[in-house]
Image: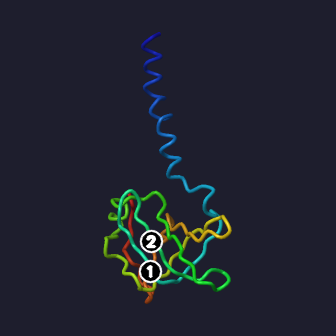
Amino acid sequence: MKKLIIGLLALVLPTVLALPIMAHHSTRGIYHEDVTVELTGTVKEWAFVNPHPYLTITAEDKNGVARDWDASYGGAAVVHLQRQGYTADTFTPGEIITVHGNPARKEGVYGILMEGGGNIPTREDGTPVVEGGSMF
């Protein structure tokens, strides 16, 4: 009986301990999952750093006001984006790009989730910034 309990704990415990880690990277509730938008703007900052690279672009909101938008890759780390072709030099401040993704739910928050679905930013001439591929 003791071996059975230890065996069950060995199976269940890692799953239970992993739940907070998965929740840490969750984007549910932050972005509209059923709404997709397109933003064209100027790269303000590209930081290819762990734990999560980030991209900030200046683009107009729905009222035509220029805002700084957090263009998020979700929980992706540098290694995930490298597998798609991203590097520290992928974006240059001042260049114009277009991003597609899910906008932030909260009014007044300027963010867009580009995670999944082939949401790779494009350059001004329409070419993708990377070739893509799987993050994993």
Q: Residues within 10 Å of mark 1 (few under 14, many from 20)?
A: many
Q: Are marks 1 and 2 in contact (CB under 8 Å)?
A: yes
Sequence-wise, which precedes: disc 1 or disc 2?
Answer: 1
Q: Amino acid at mark 2?
A: Leu
- The image's colour scheme reads rainbow
Of all residues, the one furthest to the bottom in this rendering is: 125
How far apart, in angstroms, are the residues tagged by discs 1 and 2? 8 Å
Is 78 or 85 nearer to us in this picture? 78
The quarter of the picture where residue 51 lies is: bottom left
Residue 32, horizontal then vertical, whole percent: 64, 64
Q: Position of residue 60 (x, y in %)?
A: 59, 83
- Whether 55 is drawn above or below 78: the answer is below
Please state the total of marks drawn on the protein image: 2
Query: Along the line of sight, which residue is nearer the eye, 133 or 62?
Result: 62
Q: Identify the element where label 2 is drawn.
A: strand
| Quadrant assignment, res 92 | bottom left
Amino acid type, callout 1:
Val
Residue at numbered disc 1: 43
Query: Label 1's element?
Result: strand
Pointer 2: what residue?
Answer: 55
Query: Within the image, what quadrant is residue 50 found in?
Result: bottom left
Question: As displayed, is residue 127 above or below residue 45?
Answer: below
The x, y position of residue 86, in whole percent, is 34, 70
Residue extending farthest top: 1
* Residue 75 in the image: above or below residue 88: above
